[in-house]
Amino acid sequence: MFDKWLRLPAHLYLRITALTLLTVGIALSNVLMSIGAIWIISNWLIEANFNSYWQKFKEKKTVWIVVAIYVFIAISLLWSNDAAYGFKDLRVKLPFIVIPLVLATSEPLQKKHFYFLLYVFLGVVLYTSVYNYIRYNYVLENVHDIREMSVFISHVRLSVLINFAIFTCIFLIYKKKFKPLVWIILLGWYAFYLYKSQIINGYILFLALSIFALFFFVFRMKSKKLKFTVLALAVLGGISVSILGYNTVQKLNTCEHVPFSELDLYTVNGNPYYHDTLNTQSENGSFVWLYLSNDELSQEWEKRSAIPYDSLDNKGQPMYGTLMRFLTSKHLRKDSVGLAELTDDEIQRIENGQTGVLMNQGLITRLNAFLMEYRIYSEGGDPNGHSLIQRIEHLKAAVGIIKNHWVVGVGAGDVPTAFTDQYAQMNSRLIEEHQHRSHNQFLTIWVGLGIVGFILFLLLLIWPFFELESKDYFMGMVLLSLIISCFFQDFIETQAGVTIFALFYSLALYREKEEV
C-alpha cells in the first residue's frame, strides 16, 4: 500500500526497522520487543500482498509447523481448566508465530540487511555485556550472586546471546566482512564474559558450537594435509583440555589427609567439638563436618548478623549450612574463634548465600559449585538453593505428568497447575518458590500439548536440514544453539526467550541464499 503511494519500498524499510527494534530489544528491553513484534505484523497486514504471502507460505513447510504449533496451543485450551493462563500464554508466544510468518511470506531478507542486523546485534550485546560487567564488579557493593551480572534479561538467556555473538564473529571472519581484527577483538571479549558468567548452560553450548564450527570449516578445506593437521591439533587440544579438566575436578574433590585419631576434642572455650568422620562433604579441600561447635557458632553468629542462625540466607539456603561451608573453605574451624576471623564483608557475603571463598573465578567457581551440589544430591541432601538438584526435581515432575497425560497433554492453560499438583504428589522437598517447570522446553511442550506437540516442536528444529538446499554455517549454528538451549531451559515460555527463538530462527532460514 505505502509502496504505491510513496513510490518507495516503504514496507521493506518498515520491516527492517521492526527487525532492528527486535534485535535491540532481545538484549535490552521487553518494551522494544513488544513494539517490534506489533510493528512487524502491522506492516505486514497493511502491505496486504496476500496472494504473494500465500504462494510463499505454500513453499515453506517450516512455517507450516510454526503455525500448527501455535494453533494447537490455542486448541489445547479446550481441555484446559485455566483458560485465563492459556490466553496469557498465547499472548506471550505471539512473536513465535508473528516473526517467522512475516519473514517467510515476504521477500527473502537481503544480504545487506541481514548483515546490518548482525552488526546491530553484536553492538547491543557488546553494550549489554560491558555494562553488566562494570556494574557487577565495580558498582555494586556486597552483591555476590552471579545472576546480578545480567541486568536486562535472564543471565541464562544472555549466555545464549553471548554464544550467538561469539560464533557470529567467526561467521563474519569467514565471510571476510569488514576488518577481521575487529571481530577477533569482539570475540575475545565475549568469550571472556562468558567465562566469567559462571553459567553451565553457556559453557555446554560453547563447547557444542566449537565442535560444530571446527568440523564445518575443516570439511571445507581443499587440502587434505591441512585437514589432517587441523583435526590432529583439535584432537590433541581436546585431550589436553580433558586432562586439565580431570585434574581440576580431582583437585576440587580431594581433601588433605586428616588423622582422625588426632582430632582436637574441645574448643579453646572448653566446649566439645562434633566430628562426623563418615561424612565426606568437603569445601575447598577441607571436610565440612569436622571441628564443629554448633552452640558457639550459633551464639557468635547472631551477635554479628540480623539473620537467625537456624533460618535461611538470602538465596533460600539454610543459614547454618552456608556459614559452615564458608568457614570450611577458608580452612577455619566452625567455632567462635573461626567466626571471629571473618570480616564484615564476608559476613554479608555469607548472608547473601556465598558458600565459599572461591568466587568470581568463572568456570572454576561454577565447577566447584556443581560438584558440591552433586555430592549433596547423592547423599540425599536438601535440594533447595542448589540449581542442579532442583533441576533434577523439575525433570522428575515433568516426567511424572507426561506419564499420565502423554497423548494430548494437560493443555497450555494447565501447565503451571499440573506442576504444582505433581510436586505435591511427589512430596517434593522443594519450597514453593523453587517449584518451577522442567527447565527443558521439549518436556514442557509435551506436558502442555502431548506427543503431537512434542513431535511438531522437534520437527520445527530438524526439518530445515531437509528443506533447505543451502545449509550454511549460520543456519547450522543457530539451529544447534536453539536445540541445545531447549534441552536446558524453558526457552519459549518467556517474552525474551520466545523472541530470541523466533528472530534467530527466521534470520537463519528466511534470507537470500549465500555461498556455503
Image: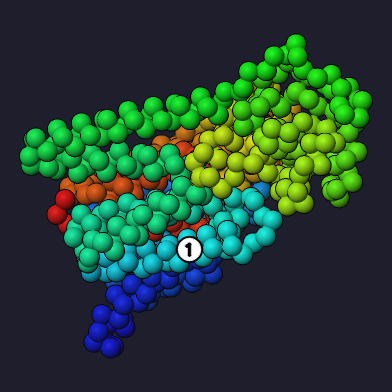
Residue 503 percent location from the top left of the image: 39, 59
Vertical placement of residue 494 versus 446, above or below: below
Q: Along the line of sight, which residue is nearer the eye, 201 or 469?
A: 201
Q: Is residue 442 left or right of residue 311?
A: left
Whether residue 63 is visible to the viewer of this picture, yes or no, is no
Look at the numbered disc 1 and give the secondary structure of its residue: helix
Vertical placement of residue 437 versus 30, above or below: above
The residue depicted at 59 percent of the width and 50 percent of the height is 146
Vertical placement of residue 474 versus 111, above or below: above
Q: Along the line of sight, which residue is nearer the eye, 74 or 331?
A: 331
- For the N terminus, give its image quadrant: bottom left
Q: Along the line of sight, which residue is nearer the eye, 38 or 153?
A: 153
Outermost top residue: 261
Few, some or many residues within 10 Å of mark 1 (<14, 14–19, 20+):
some
The residue depicted at 62 percent of the width and 22 percent of the height is 256
Q: Is residue 338 left or right of residue 231?
A: right
Q: Along the line of sight, which residue is nearer the eye, 443 or 130?
A: 130
Q: Is residue 400 left or right of residue 484?
A: right
The residue depicted at 51 percent of the width and 49 percent of the height is 197
- Picture mark count: 1
The residue depicted at 33 percent of the width and 43 percent of the height is 209
Residue 339 percent location from the top left of the image: 80, 39
Amino acid identity at mark 1: Val
Whether residue 334 is visible to the viewer of this picture, yes or no, is yes
Q: Which residue is mark 1?
A: 130
Tell me where residue 393 sits by quadrant. Answer: top right
Residue 477 percent location from the top left of the image: 31, 47
Residue 316 percent location from the top left of the image: 74, 43
Tell me where residue 370 sits by quadrant. Answer: top right
